Image (cartoon, helix red, strand yellow):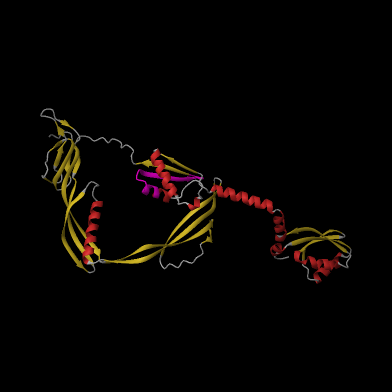
Amino acid sequence: MKNQWIEFYNGIVTVKVTGKAIERFLNKLIRNGINIWNVKRLDSSAISFDMRLKDIKKIRLTVRGSDCKLEFIGRKGIPFLLKRVIRNSGFLFGFILFLGIILLLSNIVWGIEIKGANPATEHQIRKELNKMDIKVGKLQFFTDNVEGIQKELTNRIEAITWVGVELIGTTYHFQVVEKNEPPKPEYVGPRHLIATKKAHIEQIQVETGQPVVQINDYVRPGQLLVSGFIGSEGKIKKIAAKGKIYGQTWYETKVDLPLKSTFKVLNGNEEQKVFIKIRKIKLHIWGFKKIIYKQYEVEENWTPIKFLKWELPVSVGNKVYRESEQVTREYGDQEAIKFAKQYARSDLLSQLPDDAKIKDEKILQRSIDNGKVSISILFQIIEDIAEGQPIIQGDTE
């Protein structure tokens, strides 16, 4: 019979028929529209065959008045499997519950280990982890990924230079490098200090060496500032000159700022959708609301589900849709000049050492044309202009 797999879903019964005139009985079945297949002769007075479960009533009516007896010797198909499952539902429920508990426990954070940090820093890290909702007993797929945790901790805690984050099984491992590690002493050979740029000397701070310039002196690039030769005539000694020579330098900066600009910002509205991914098949399980935002940004995160120490080919992920909008910013003439000056200051300072500072500034040129303001500013900067220059063998004072 064709399409037996369809009959499997409806239910199949194996019947044994015994008695006389079996052939007439089979012909009667066919006339009554009862389909049979896999007909087998067991002996001279008995046969077996398969039939549909739904035809049982018909065959019972057919067997009446015949010299045959029916015996149901087998059953298969979905209806019988469901009946068996229902009969053993207690065991099945317990087994599913057991697997569910193991699966749940395998995806909970059970430990947080921190290495390389002193007690004070470790306490601070644990406080920040609590604020980030990363704690023992938390489901892993409701926490941020390790890259996000690493970035947040580095930004929030000034006492650490770097933190490595690794999730092994059900435990987060943090390896911390603190900023207060003692710097390794650097060997510096005999050297002079020379000027790196044109400057008026403002301040002289010499640790070792012999200063050869004074405050208010004007120096040029390459000019000697602090000599590495010390001692009296006949007893000259070469040392590493150390110190800082602060001089007044000049920088000219040009800035163009549009009076009107358009940019994209997030307005705080967001929607979240949750998915389960089984290998390459993605199933949407929560958050079915249609995204009505005209413009938005999407952030997607996936967390693999674990069973004991094994990572299953199943992941739980979420997509966060954050609404964005176009904002147009327009400056007046004076306001644009003000913001252009602020931008020029911050841009210049970002390129200078941390101890450099702006002493004065002067606008050399400014213009407003074609929807933008253009300014040229001269900055007077106080910065360390000293740089080491090794003393070559044979150099004399």
Q: Percent from the top left, x then y, of residue 58? A: 80, 68
Q: Percent from the top left, x then y, of residue 85? A: 69, 55
Farthest residue toward the top?
Answer: 234
Q: Is residue 260 left or right of residue 237?
A: right
Q: Percent from the top left, x then y, of residue 286? A: 52, 61
The segment highlighted magenta reads 152-171
Residue depicted at x 23% and y 62%: 256
Q: Is residue 154 magenta?
A: yes
Q: Is residue 138 left or right of residue 353?
A: right
Q: Is residue 174 left or right of residue 94?
A: left
Residue depicted at x 16% and y 62%: 365
Does residue 236 appear in this view?
yes
How many numbered discs sit on the rendered protein?
A: 0
Q: Is residue 184 magenta?
A: no
Q: Is residue 27 left or right of residue 353?
A: right
Q: Quadrant of residue 28?
A: bottom right
